[in-house]
Amino acid sequence: WSKDKGKDGFSFYEPHMKEKSVRIMQLELELRKAIDNNEFILYYQPKIDLKTNEISGCEALIRWNHPTMGMVSPAEFIPLAEETGLISQIGEWVLREACLQNRKWHEAGYNNFIMAVNMSAHQFKQPTMIGMIERILHETNHEAKHLEIEVTESVSMLSEEVIMSQLYALKRLGVSIAIDDFGTGYSSLKYLDMLPADVLKIDKSFIDEIGRMNHLSSSLMTNAIISLAKSLKMKVVAEGIENIDQIHYLKLHNCEYGQGYLISKPLPACELEMKFMRSNEKVFLAV
Ligand code: C2E
Ligand code: MG
Ligand code: MG
Ligand code: MG
């Protein structure tokens, strides 16, 4: 685009691009400070066993509580963190925090609790990812079998070699693998069969259609995904359950696990404890 440059050497696009990069640099600076200033917090959303209504574990979801911007959604800052490479540092913080919290819950008697942590494709590209996970598990004295890593089909953009070697290394560590937002990506069924994944999470968009007037095709998709998961010997989780009709439908069609606002929104650890762990009994839910 040097041809577009005028005699003075400034291109028409330059001010805009400069503005954009300044804005990104500012946000990047804010993100860097956020780690040092402890502005991140993890919320936890329970997953329940749809047969027993018992909580089987939860998913850690990051929140950024910025001093002036307030709560910033991960949908906004995770992409920036990926672009800038800060996701590695943030991801390490998330994993440590989630493992420490799960250790506390295990010590309090919930010793089968599974902690699920989201990892982005960018983290999967890092050759240091497996070493980092191993180190955090060791540091926090957290068993690998109680950790689940959620990845979206976006990892399929990485080379097959990279994904396979990272996923198999995770398996060797003893960590479980969940395919998040399943059905929205572009991975083929053949590809899914190759992946050493343990859990399929049916994307919310399929669950949304259940109970609606014109729900036939989506509930057929939900059924198909449940059968697919079962034939691949994978566990299946429905995400984004918001109403009773959906939960009844999923129970009827033998979906094993469920997650969604109907059961609980993501909550800070102490609120989750107050809501679900008050008595020293097993964690049950009235749905
Ligand atoms: P996700 O992993 O698919 O997480 C599910 C998202 O749906 C969460 O949004 C959750 O709050 C929301 N959700 C759960 N149940 C319901 C429901 O019944 N109705 C509705 N409308 N929404 C529901 P959240 O927390 O804003 O996170 C958005 C995405 O950001 C996550 O999608 C995940 O991809 C990413 N993310 C969150 N935390 C992390 C993290 O620590 N690391 C990485 N790499 N990504 C993260
Ligand atoms: Mg997830
Ligand atoms: Mg999801
Ligand atoms: Mg999602």
Image: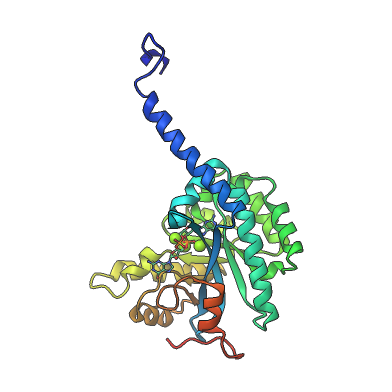
73 relative to 121, above or below? below
Judge left or right: residue 268 versus residue 260: right
Tell which of 220 and 268 is nearer to you: 268
Residue 119: x percent and y percent?
57, 55
Residue 107: x percent and y percent?
70, 79
90 relative to 137, above or below? above
Residue at horizontal 31 percent and vertical 69 percent from the top = 209
Judge left or right: residue 102 versus residue 131: left
Judge left or right: residue 250 versus residue 124: left
| Type of colouring | rainbow
Residue 67: x percent and y percent?
48, 56
Specify the quadrant that holds the N terminus: top left
Judge left or right: residue 219 versus residue 254: left
Specify the quadrant that holds the C terminus: bottom left
Residue 8: x percent and y percent?
39, 10
> Is residue 261 visible to the viewer in this orientation of the structure?
yes
54 relative to 145, above or below? below
> Is residue 182 visible to the viewer in this orientation of the structure?
no
Furthest residue toward front: 68
Tell which of 5 and 138 is nearer to you: 5
How many marks do you count on the picture? 0
Residue at horizontal 68 percent and vertical 69 percent from the top = 145
Furthest residue toward top: 7
Furthest residue toward left: 213
Tell which of 67 and 55 is nearer to you: 67
